[in-house]
Image: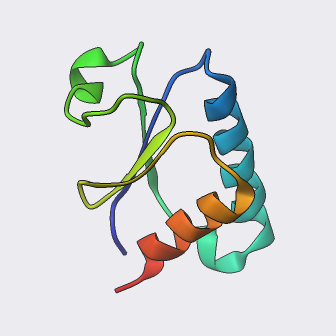
Amino acid sequence: MKKLTYVMAQWCPYCKMATRWLNTLMNEDERFKDIDIDVVDIDADPQRAAEYPHELVPNFWIDGKKVFEGVPSKPIIRDIIEKTLES
């Protein structure tokens, strides 16, 4: 399984939306239950967040490559999770 990193901020409404979609999808689909998501909060850990160049939150990285940045939707989050499962 690939490494999924989620860069977010607690105050961001779009991050809250992305987190809700992640939780929903992980409960809906058995394949997603064991995915380990590395969550990086830009305010709690700014040094670590700097390792993931971004303009917006939320953003998602798979194996160190940015795969999404911006306003999330359920289909977008599902696609990110599915890409994490690809070998």
| Residue 20 against residue 35 in the figure, above or below | above
Residue 4 at x, y = what percent? 40, 57
- Asked if residue 18 is positioned above or below residue 51 in the image, the reply reads below
Residue 50 x, y percent position in the rendering: 22, 25
Residue at left offset 80%, top offset 69%: 28
Residue at left offset 19%, top offset 33%: 51
Q: How is the image coloured?
A: rainbow
Is 36 situated left or right of 66 in this image?
A: right
Q: Indicate the quadrant containing the N terminus: top left, top right, bottom left or bottom right.
A: bottom left
Q: Which residue is drawn at 69% across and 24% down?
A: 13
Question: How many numbered marks are there?
Answer: 0
The residue at the point 32 percent across, 33 percent down is: 54
Q: Position of residue 45 (x, y in %)?
A: 33, 19
Which quarter of the picture shows residue 42?
Answer: top left
Spot occupied by residue 83 in the image (x, y as percentages of width and height): 45, 74
Judge left or right: residue 33 versus residue 85.
right
Looking at the picture, tell me which residue is in the foreground, 16 or 56: 56
19 w.r.t. 82: above or below? above
Farthest residue to the bottom: give it. 87
Q: In which quadrant is the C terminus drawn?
A: bottom left
